[in-house]
Each structure stands twice: as C-alpha cells, then as structure tokens.
C-alpha cells in the first residue's frame, strides 16, 4: 500500500495526514474509505476496535467531524423533566426505577412540572421529558400538561418519551403506537429522545432488560415518528455485558433505519454507570474504551449528523475530550437530571450558558447555541 503525506484542510481544521502512520496502525484502508466518503463495513468496525492507537482513531473521527461541522460545537438551553421513576419494567442495569410505594419512588403532578419549568434559570428552548413506565398514568395527563407547557413556553420544543414509553402508553390505552404519537404531536410534542435503545442484540438485551420493548419495535416506533414529522435521537448503552460485535450490530441497525426513514438527528453513546445497578460487571468501562466507542460511532454512523458528548454521564472533562474523538454536541444546561445521577454520575446537575461556552472554547472549538432540532440560534 502506498505511503504518502498530505495536508487536509477541513472547515478551519488542518490535518497533516501521513498515510504511513495509518498503515502502521492498521487503518490505511479505512482512511482511504473515509476520505472517499465510503461506508465502513462491520469488519472495518472490528478493525477499529482492535486498534491500539487511540490517537489514530481520534484523528479519523475528527476528520469526519470537521468535514461535517468544522470547529462548531453545539449546545442547547434545555431543561430535563423526569416525571416519575415508578416503572414496571425492572431492567437489571437501572438504578433509577422504583416500584410504587417503595422508598424513593416519586411521581410529579402537572403543577410540579409547571413549577419546575417556571423556576428554570433561563427560559428553556428544549424540554426533555422522560420517565419510567408507570402502570397507570393516562396519556391524557401528558396531553393536558403539554398543552399548558406550550401555552406558557411557546419557544420551547417538547422532546418527549422514549420509544419504550410510547409503546407502553399505546399498550395501556389500547391504541397503536402511531395513534399515540399522533395524539402527543397534536398536544405539542415535536421530538423523541433516543433513550431505551440500550443494546439491540437480542440475547444481550434479554439479559439486561427482558421486559423492555425489543429492538425491532424500538426501531419501528422511531420509523413511525420520522414519518409523522418528528425528528428523534438515538442512543446506545455500552460498557456492561455486551460484546464488541453487539456494539457494531447496534450501530449498523441504526444507520440502516436512518437510510429508510432519515429522522435521527443525533446519536448519544451512553457509558454504563455501575453504581446502584443490579447488573454485575466483570470489567468496568475504561475512559479509553469510552473515547474509542465515541470515535467509532462517528465513523460508522455516516448518515447521522450529530454525535453527543453527554457530559452528565461522561463527566465534563471526558465530554470535553470526546470533542476530539468525533463528538460535536455538548448537550446543554440540563438543570436537573435524575436518571444518570441515581446511577452514580458525579457531574453537576446543571451548567450555565457561559460555563458551556467556556468549556467548548477551552478545547479549541467554537460554541454554537442551537435549538432542539439543531438549528443554530
Ligand atoms: S431503564 Fe427505563 S424502562 Fe428500564 S426499569 Fe429503568 S426506568 Fe424502567
């Protein structure tokens, strides 16, 4: 294979590319594919995971990231609302869920939710609503709440409910998931967050969350949402008992769904946090594995525009590093987050706009405020 050096200028970033360097790292043919804009195969994904040269992986992911977004790193003024942790699914990895009546169980009323939104330090542009699969909160509760939210916070996009919750509401209401999505959309919801995807590989999924919506149905709900005009996000929970083949299968299924319905905005790699989980892990995730997985996600998901460095789960310093491993979105102000923190996340509960901007600038990137749909504000 020929060795050569050249400069690559991409949206203000300049890379001195040495083909020999990538050849020596075993990534020469993958570099060629990336420069040609070709899709990487699952075998390429295995080669990337086997590569020991973290810098080479980060550089490849940065080339793609710079090509797509230059030095821009996005953030949003958002507010999370976790409306309940009462859940019937009992996923083994979950540190958040409680049974009804159990100590620590909570359920917010409509007034509680409105009060939390009113007390947010800045008017949110994105309201992220997720919770457990509660046995009997009716869909009408959320329809009424969303109408009130939209009348008081018209500038905010409601990003609500994982595909798992959508399927749960459909089941308890005895209606289809399409009808559920239509009713919520009419009430003001515009986006779906990406949670509940966990890991798609059936055998592993059965072990960590046997009662949860399966992969095909998770993807089906997102496909339906895309067709109804929702944009959605997608996630992968990694660093538990899944294999590298499971991670690559997961990424491959997401990009195939995106080829079909095209509504995914952003992929969020979620590192598994072990605290308070019932899932026993032999080898806890390392920071290096986190960065590798983020970089490889950027490289494999050639048709999903954004990769999030979710500071709540990664911690802010690792999230900053992730910006050099393919991530281009820093999430946002968040304000109050319970799911990751009950699993042991040690990050703050909230960041201010100036803290976010300073962190992004401190890593050599340009902060860009966005709305929920990634339009620049
Ligand atoms: S991960 Fe979600 S669905 Fe599973 S138990 Fe926790 S709250 Fe319920």
Image (tube, rainbow, N blue to C red):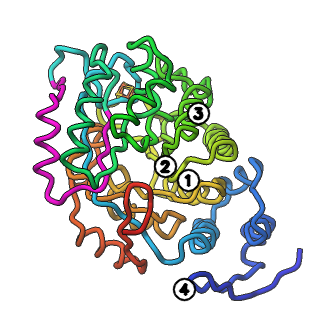
Magenta-colored span: 104-130
Q: Residue at horizontal 51%, vertical 35%?
A: 197
Label placed on residue 212: none
Q: What distance separates the C-alpha of mark 4 from that of mark 2?
A: 26 Å
Is the residue marked by circle 2 packed among few (<14), some (14-19), or many (20+) residues within 10 Å? many
For residue 124: magenta? yes
Does ligand 1 reach within 8 Å of label 4's beta carbon?
no
- Res 145 → quadrant: top left
Height in image: 115 above or below 7?
A: above
**Residue 306 within the magenta-colored segment of the rendering:** no
Decide: is 58 above or below 264: below
Give the percent coordinates (x, y) of residue 257.
65, 41
* Mark 3–mark 1 CB contact (< 8 Å): no
Left or right of 44 in this view: 364: left
Q: Is residue 275 left or right of residue 110?
A: right
Please report contact status of discs 4 and 3: CB closer than 8 Å, yes or no: no
Q: N-terminal of the two: label 3 or label 1?
A: 3
Can you tell which of label 4 and label 2 is closer to the viewer?
4
**Quarter containing ligand 1?**
top left
Q: Picture coordinates of residue 292 (x, y %)?
A: 56, 57
Q: Nearer the viewer, residue 186 or 110?
A: 186
Q: Nearer the viewer, mark 3 or mark 2?
A: 3
Task: Give x and y (percent) for residue 252.
Answer: 68, 43
Check whether the beta carbons of the residues at disc 4 and disc 2 lie within 8 A of each other: no
- Which residue is under mark 1? 293
Q: Which residue is mark 4?
A: 12
On the image, numbered disc 3 is attached to which residue? 219
Q: Earlier in the sequence, mark 3 or mark 2?
A: 3
> Residue 159 or 339: which is nearer the viewer?
159
Quadrant containing the N terminus in the rendered view: bottom right
Mark 3 neighbour density, 10 Å: few (under 14) some (14–19) many (20 or more): many
Name the residue carrying label 2. Answer: 269
């Amino acid at each position: 294979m020929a060795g050569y050096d050249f400069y690559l200028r991409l949206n203000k970033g300049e890379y001195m590319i040495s083909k020999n360097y990538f050849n020596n790292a075993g990534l020469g043919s993958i570099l060629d594919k990336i420069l040609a804009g070709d899709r990487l195969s699952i075998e390429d994904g295995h080669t990337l995971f086997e590569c020991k040269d973290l810098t080479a992986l980060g550089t490849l992911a940065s080339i793609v990231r710079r090509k797509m977004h230059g030095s821009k790193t996005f953030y949003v003024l958002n507010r999370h609302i976790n409306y309940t942790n009462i859940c019937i699914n009992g996923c083994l990895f979950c540190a958040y869920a409680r049974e009804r009546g159990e100590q620590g169980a909570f359920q917010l009323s409509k007034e509680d939710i409105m009060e939390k939104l009113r007390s947010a330090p800045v008017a949110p542009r994105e309201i992220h609503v997720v919770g457990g699969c509660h046995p009997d909160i009716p869909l009408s509760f959320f329809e009424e709440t969303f109408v009130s939210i939209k009348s008081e916070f018209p500038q905010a996009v409601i990003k609500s409910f994982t595909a798992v919750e959508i399927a749960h509401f459909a089941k308890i209401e005895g209606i289809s998931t399409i009808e559920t999505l239509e009713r919520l959309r009419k009430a003001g919801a515009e986006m779906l967050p990406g949670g509940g995807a966990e890991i798609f590989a059936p055998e592993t999924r059965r072990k960590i969350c046997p009662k949860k919506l399966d992969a095909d149905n998770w993807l089906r709900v997102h496909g339906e949402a895309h067709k109804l005009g929702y944009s959605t996000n997608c996630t992968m929970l990694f660093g538990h008992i899944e294999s590298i083949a499971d991670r690559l299968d997961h990424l491959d299924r997401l990009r195939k769904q995106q080829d079909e319905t095209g509504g995914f905005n952003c992929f969020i790699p979620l590192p598994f946090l072990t605290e308070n989980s019932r899932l026993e892990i032999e080898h806890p995730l390392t920071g290096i594995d986190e960065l590798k997985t983020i970089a490889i996600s950027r490289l494999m998901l050639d048709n999903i525009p954004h990769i999030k460095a979710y500071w709540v789960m990664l911690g802010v310093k690792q999230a900053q590093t992730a910006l050099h491993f393919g991530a281009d979105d820093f999430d946002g102000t968040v304000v109050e987050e319970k799911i990751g923190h009950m699993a042991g996340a040690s990050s703050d509960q909230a960041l201010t706009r100036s803290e976010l901007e300073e962190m992004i600038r401190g890593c050599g990137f340009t902060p860009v405020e966005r709305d929920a749909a990634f339009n620049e504000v």
